[in-house]
Amino acid sequence: MTEREKDIIENECLTRRRSLLRLAGIAAAAGGGAAWRLESADAAGSGPRAVSSGLVACVLTPELTEGPYYVAGEKLRRNITEGKPGTPLLLGLTVLNASTCKPVRNAAVEIWHCDALGVYSGAVAGSPGTNFLRGVQKTNASGVATFQTLYPGWYRGRAVHIHVKVHVGGSVVHTGQLFFPAAVTNAVYQKAPYSGHGTTPDTLNADDSIFRNGGNKGMLALKKTATGYGGSIRMGVHVS
């Protein structure tokens, strides 16, 4: 092979690589949750190589069903436990602009989930006049909304999860669900009050139809604390 032929092949490879990277960047900014579906033949780690290498810094958070137990107009508050028993869980939920990767300040983040025995509050769940484990927080300058809550229990047919909804400028920009690593769940459920309901959920993450539709992108990063667990996740959303 001549030197000229080698140069032509190298240029073609470089051109193709630039095109792939450009397409990855476009996918990361696309609407409808397309960015998180980005796949790559040379993916590294747990995500596409373009993301894990920093070439694409932010991806959209997948949209997942709201579920049947949503109640609008919940209170603005950090502590949502309402005296319910369970393992403390301190959540730090970060909202980012998926197009710019910058924190979104003053976004209203609301969460709701069942208690240690798998029961939801609110009239829609058959417990009128209650609002335990529901609440809203505004994100700070770093885009973080903090909640004091409890590790959720489980109920039939669903993996362990927390519902989340994000509002920016009065519009809903994200509806999703947050999931938990099985190893941590199994450890938490060995103790009361969870153990009284059953030490193993009847539906694992891999068997949950909603988790299979993108829930792995909603997996919380958990860290053991002196009293319970701390959980965090970054949620990329389109703000306009």
Image (tube, rainbow, N blue to C red):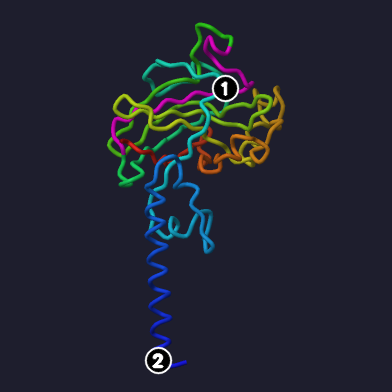
In the picture, the disc for residue 57 is none
Graded by Cα atoms within 10 Å as few (under 14), some (14 to 19) or many (20 or more), the crowding at tag 1 reads many
- The residue singled out by tag 1 in the image is 114
- On whether residue 143 falls in the magenta region, the answer is no
Give the mark toward the camera: 1 or 2: 2
Residue placed most toward the observer, 175 or 20: 20
The C terminus appears in which quarter of the rendering? top left
Q: Earlier in the sequence, mark 1 or mark 2?
A: 2
Relative to residue 129, is residue 76 drawn left or right?
A: left
The residue drawn where x is 34% and y is 26% is 171
On screen, 52 above or below 120? below
Span shown in magenta: 104-125
In which quadrant of the rendered view does residue 76 lie? top left
- Residue 68, compared with residue 95, is above or below; it is above
The residue indicated by pointer 2 is 3
Amino acid, disc 2: Glu
Residue at image point 42% right, 69% down? 16
Q: Is mark 2 on a helix, strand or loop?
A: helix
Residue that appears at 61% across and 31% down: 160
Q: In this view, does 204 lie to the left or right of 178?
A: right
Q: Give how far across and how far down residue 14 sits, in percent.
A: 39, 73
Q: How crowded is mark 2: few (under 14 residues within 10 Å), some or many (20 or more)?
A: few
Is there a contact, CB below 8 Å, between mark 1 and mark 2? no
| Disc 1 element | loop
Q: Inspect the image, locate mark 1, and give the three-letter code of the amino acid beneath it.
A: Cys
Q: Is residue 122 magenta?
A: yes
Residue 194's spot in the image, x, y percent?
65, 25
Dominant secondary structure, magenta: loop
- List the single residue furthest toward the bottom: 2
Q: Where is residue 56 in the image (x, y as percent from the top left)?
A: 39, 55
What is the C-alpha distance between the residues marked 1 and 2? Answer: 67 Å
